[in-house]
Amino acid sequence: MPSYFRGISKGILLDIGRAILVAIGIITLLIAIAVVSCTWIASSGDTYELKGSYSSPDGSHLLAVGLSMGGGAAGSCSRHLLIMPSQIQFDGRKVQEEYQVGMLGCGGEIKIQWESETLVHVLVVLSEPWDQIGSGYLLGTHDRSGKVKVDYRFGAM
């Protein structure tokens, strides 16, 4: 046993070790609680608004465009594209992720044009140089059933 441990019993060393482990556990728990609380507070300001809906030529499908705005210090903005059978009840108050075919940032403008009941064109027009489609965007090629193809095009005014 090293000289600086002489006179200290093993019991005291074990008690000190346990106390250190308990302190680390408490600190870890407090950090986890703080992170969860901040995440909950930041997301509590999220809103969703239906911006438009476009029916396919035969009326069998509906393409809905929604806008979600997130709370928090930095905030967030996303546009969601959903294609669903027209008989589905869509309340327009939340993203129904199972029908989502696209998610873009809020820069620019979106134009929707159905070419047929199985093909829809989504034109994203960026009007300003600083407009962005978003860094975490999602561009799906087909709806959930696989029957409707989504054709994305990007342009500038």
Image (tube, rainbow, N blue to C red):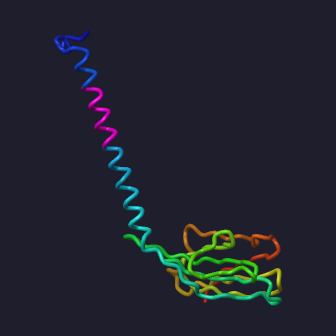
Quarter of the rendering containing residue 34: bottom left
- For the point 52% across and 82% down, which residue is it? 129
Give the quarter of the figure containing the N terminus: top left
Task: Give x and y (percent) for residue 84.
Answer: 73, 78
Q: Is residue 84 magenta?
A: no
Residue at 68% x, 69% y is 98
* Above or below, 71 relative to 14: below
* Residue 22 covered by magenta stretch: yes
Q: Main secondary structure of the magenta part?
A: helix
Report how many numbered discs are placed on residues in the image: 0
The residue furthest left is 7
Q: Is residue 153 left or right of residue 45?
A: right
Q: Splitting the image into 4 quarters, where does residue 50 fall?
A: bottom right
What x and y, as percent, mark residue 81? 65, 78
Q: Is residue 101 left or right of residue 23?
A: right
Is 74 left or right of 124, judged from the image as shown? left
Which quadrant, please, contains the C terminus?
bottom right
Task: Identify the residue shown where x is 28% and y is 37%.
Answer: 23
* Pick the front one: 78 or 8: 8
The structure residue drawn at horizontal position 16% and vertical position 12%, both measured from the top left corner, is 7
The boundaries of the magenta stretch are: 16-26
Residue 11 drawn at (x, y percent) = 25, 17
State the residue in front, 128 or 40: 40
x, y percent for residue 2: 23, 11
> Relative to the observer, which residue lies in front, 156 or 19?
19
Q: Is residue 10 above or below residue 132?
A: above
